[in-house]
Amino acid sequence: MPFNLLVLFCLLYVIALFLVAWLVERRASRGVMGFLRSPLVYTLSLSIYCTAWTFYGAVGYAARSGIEFLTIYLGPTLVFVGWWWLLRKLVRIGRQQRVTSIADLLSSRYGKSNLLGVLVTVIAVVASTPYIALQLQSVTLSFAVFASETPSGWALPDRNATAIWVAGGLALFTILFGTRKLDAKEQHHGIVMAIAVEAVVKLVALLAVGAFVVWGLAEGPLAVIEKISAVDSPGWQVQPGRWAGLIFIAAAAVISLPRMFQVLVVENVEESHLARASWAFPLYLCLMSLFILPIAVIGMERYPQANPDMLVLTLPLSEGQGALAMLVFLGGFSSATSMVIVETIALATMLSNHLLMPLWLRFKPGALTGDLRRGVLLARRFSIIGVLALGLAYFRLSGGSAALAAIGLIAFAGMAQALPVLLGGIFWRGATKTGAVAGLVTGFAVWAYTLFLPSFGQGAVIPAHVFAGGAFGLPWLRPQGLFGTQGMDPLVHSIFWSLVLNTAAFCAGSIFSFPDPVERVQGAAFVNAFDGEVQAERLGWSQGQAEPEALLILAQRILGEEALSFFEAGARAQGKDGYLPDITPAFLADLERRLAGSVGAATAHAMISQLFGQATVTVEDLMAVATEAAQIMEYSTRLEQNQEELTRTARQLREANEKLTQLSVQKDAFLGQISHELRTPMTSIRAFSEILSEGDLPPQMVADYGHILHDEAVRLTRLLDDLLDLSVLENGTVQLNLGLSHLGRMLDRAEAAASQTRPERAFRIEREGVEEIFLHTDADRLVQVFINLISNARKYCDAEAAVLKIRLRQKGGRVIADFIDNGSGIAKEAQGLIFEKFARLTDQRRAGGAGLGLAICREIMANLGGSIGYLPGQKGAAFRVTLPLRLEAAKG
Amino acid sequence: MTGRVLLIEDEQNIAEAIRFLLSRDGFEVEVQRDGVAGLQAARAAPPGLVILDLMLPGLSGIEILTALRADPRTERLPVMMLTAKGQGRDREAAEAAGVSVFMSKPFANAEMRAQVRALMGM
């Protein structure tokens, strides 16, 4: 078959795929999903797991190592059949969080850590580059095979040129369909459909070759099985360690490989599709592997010299089956292109989201204000070209020599490093960013040191002496014999150590670090993904396209009347009549800014996002809203506090003012009373002195009036004495003369002194109780109190035969003296008043004092550490004096 | 109009001084030491002049004055008020209640006697 014809077929095939993708895109953009929403398409798209490596390489693998190639299919089968609940959770989380890639998922789970995103992106790019190179290599090789095996004898012009053409074509295709539009969900319906078509092509091609081999070359299945059993190759020995390791990394790969994650999670349109895929995909893998062994055995038997990795193609070619060879070629081409396209899209998404955009935004801070879409798309396109260029560079550098399967396994092991962090992230709330970074870095380093770098060959990157003696001369650091492990298969050795150390670092890092709030919230959202969905549904969040009316209602709630004029202005600016403008990004940005002025930027963004349905409200948004709300609350709390403080101050001021007013009134009243008490005797003195000075008075009257003058002068003096005494006692500046005094003798003194008061009265004092008490107190002051009480009784007791009973007793460290007379007592309502200054209940003539006596008594008793009070419930007036047996000087 | 003066004053010595002075001037002086008794006396036989102390047991001077002014028989009775408190407020209250003359204690005997004579229309 001429080369040009081959290229023409390829071109036609690509154009057909192009058409399929284009039509589907167009239908999808019109909202017609139709058959796109079928689980079959989803299942077929998963078949990009089977790359050119599986298409061509599986036969080579089988030829070299026998049935071991099955491990690559067993891993995914186990995952889909046995771990469907894990996949379901991944898909659920992916949809809830609008995850765009595995890097996005991990960064999102661990507190939106960009560091983690970068790390995963780097690992993915490093691990995938050889894999992409592998696809280019297989396509180039298949071209070469056609060239060499064709009887017409054309030679492939230049392998490198072919690879460049293929890579360029793939880049174009990927850019055209991978970056046509920017969708928040990163779904590419056209490409998924194209992949599904390619999946059918490669399955049909492989089955056709298998059928041809079994029924065309051999004598039916039984003969083939016999031949297979007869093979006795040393490589065909089953090695349990390798089996376990390979099954494990194949299982890990089907989850964590960027392209697998892309089709499995990101491109998933309906979670229920997973149910079909959980048995249909293993079935697909089963069919794909059905004829691998027969092709390998029969091919090796017939063409022992051929490259086993190309047997699928060389067999029909050599047997002269041109059409079949063409189909196989297209199958291989499909495998390679679909893998490269999806892998490139996945990597480009990661690169642009986690590396390029953050860098761009960092160095051009103003960029955020404009429309980001153009920048993002540009970053995607450059990323796609970059990824393919890397693959091409690797292909040219490695010279395309290594066996296909080996490169594939290295990539698998590399991406498997993301598995512990991924599983921990969705099942263990305690997993933290620190742990994730530690695990990833450790795993990646060990993988690079033990598998990736050695794959370039001894001495290529790692010097030969390190292989023999270990790094830094430490034998336990040998790349293929870490910690002294001997005789392990290098692949198994690397998988074992990288994943063990990875997991250990991840767990240790998680246990010994604390997650920040975003991490905690995200951790909960991921681990409890299934609870979250229920809640979100109950809340009734709609994610539909926002109607202008809905936006207007939202805006009116916040802006009020202003909203309508804002919308009208927006409509006018767009040249529209009425008040509802088209919802353009520019208008939304304006509105968001306007709303932000009222409710804060984060809240405004969250509101618009939710209505507009372009992105869900992320945890970060909510945190920002919460922060804003907290600030507002803090502010209002502060205001409230200020308000309270003001109220409190005002109340204190009012109280102080009232007190001052009250004091002022009291002071006025007191001054008025003093004035009255002073002026009264003064009046008598002045009047009589004038009368006396006039002369002409009988001597008796002169004597009487002279007597009055004397009495009033005495009264004035006593009043002044009392006032001074009271002032001293009240101020606490009184000097107490403390000493031991006999209680009985003090009462004697008081009785004698008081006998001057109304001496004409019949008055008897009865004393009872213990008098032999020595008190440590100020005797003079105490006697003053006693005198006051006795003379009050003498003055006021209204009984015919006045009797004052003085009862003494000691109780604990205190002495109690009751003074009770047999008069009519003091009216209940007056009992509280008698101790106040100038409180005089009867008329002044009888009292002969200014009404300060009891007030002075109260002050004296307070100074002596005791008290005086009215004793209600007795027949007559009754007072109780209580004082300590021993008054300490300090107290005075 | 009689030359009778009703003196309502609880301070015995002051009452004696006023009684002595006014008696010497030819007035008939009746002394009451209690507010209630004083008001009764004023009503029972309206005198030519009432001299009232402000602070009294029973009824206060203002209360007696108000009662006198409310009674048609005594509403035009001249009333002299004496007080030892000497605060502006008391004077205002007394004037509002319709006092004829307000005097502070202590007073000059001559002034007091002149006021009494004036009030008695002499």
Image (cartoon, coloured by chain):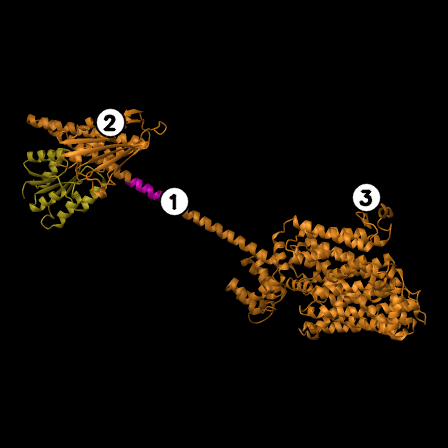
Chain colours: A orange, B yellow
Report whether A469 appears left or right of A640.
right
Q: Mark 3 points at which residue?
A: A474
Q: Gap in Å between the C-alphas at discs 2 and 3?
A: 106 Å
Q: Mark 1 points at which residue?
A: A652
Residue A799 picture location, percent across and down: 14, 37
- Give the magenta range: A649-665
> What amino acid is labelled 1 in the image?
Gln
Asked if the stretch drawn in magenta spans residue A120, the answer is no
Report whether A696 appears left or right of A292.
left
Asked if the stretch drawn in magenta spans residue A656, the answer is yes
**Disc assigned to residue A744:** 2
Tag 3 subunit: A
Magenta stretch prevailing secondary structure = helix
* Residue A831 location, quadrant: top left
> For the C terminus of chain A, which image quadrant?
top left
Tag 1 subunit: A
Report whether A294 appears left or right of A33.
right
Asked whether the residues under the numbered discs 2 and 3 touch, taking CB atoms below 8 Å apart as contact, a structural biologist would say: no
Q: What element carries label 3?
A: loop
